[in-house]
Image: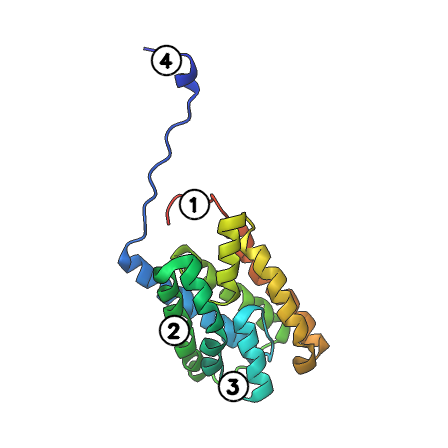
Amino acid sequence: MTTTGPAATRPPAAAAPLPHSRAEDVAGLLVGTFLASLGLHLLHAASAVTGGTAGLALLLGYAAGLPFGVLFPLVNLPFVVLAVRVKGWAFTLRSALAVAAVSLLSPLQAACLPDLRIDPVYAVLAGNLVAGTGLLVLFRHRASLGGFGVLALVLQERLGWRAGYVQMVLDVAVVTASVAVVGPAVAALSAAGAVVLNLVLAMNHRPGRYTGS
């Protein structure tokens, strides 16, 4: 029997969201943090920076001669309270684990890829593409690398602003401040790389794009 009227044109009901399993979340955190740490190592090999707290940790490391793995969790501490209040304990704990994993993987990347000689342009572009993909994986598993990522996700959920574009503005501000440490040429290259990273997020992580969590 043929159905006519409003029921005939009614779109099919959307499938219920299918959450990631715990094993998938663990695998996602491992993959995301590995990619992020590899991308940051490529940037470090070119003495470049990026945006966010990762870029701030790199910048402070160049200026003070301290390891990235030590500085990265420290610069993320002020954002922990924000994450707990607006994202809850589950998101905060996953993000804290991700920050700790990247900090621990940083010396591993350096040990496995010592004395890496790489073209600066390639290092910045590839490093930000790889790190951006890692950050995207973490977002899809309800985690982040803290810092500006937390703020960007909050603004996306509350105001509908795309996380990638929000973080892009904040990241360019951090990179601009790096001119005094890395020089204008490297800072300009780093700013272009930060745009690349956040375009990866803006084009692939937006409200309503996914049905699952």
| 205 relative to 98 in the view: left or right | right
Residue at the extreme right? 184
| 174 relative to 22 in the view: left or right | right
The quarter of the picture where residue 126 lies is: bottom right
The residue labelled by disc 4 is: 3
Q: Circles 3 and 1: CB distance less than 8 Å?
A: no
Crowd class of label 4 (few under 14; some 14 to 19; many from 20; radius 10 Å) = few
Secondary structure under the numbered disc 1 in the rendered image: loop
205 lies above or below 150: above
Q: Residue sitting at 60 percent across and 66 percent down? A: 171
Q: CA distance from mark 2 to mark 4?
A: 56 Å
Instruction: Identify which amino acid the numbered label 1 is placed on.
Output: Tyr
Q: Which mark is residue 115?
A: 3
Q: Earlier in the sequence, mark 1 or mark 4?
A: 4
Q: Earlier in the sequence, mark 2 or mark 4?
A: 4
Q: Earlier in the sequence, mark 3 or mark 4?
A: 4
- Residue 116 lies, in percent from the top left, at 53, 82
Instruction: Identify which amino acid the numbered label 3 is placed on.
Output: Asp
Q: CA distance from mark 3 to mark 1?
A: 41 Å
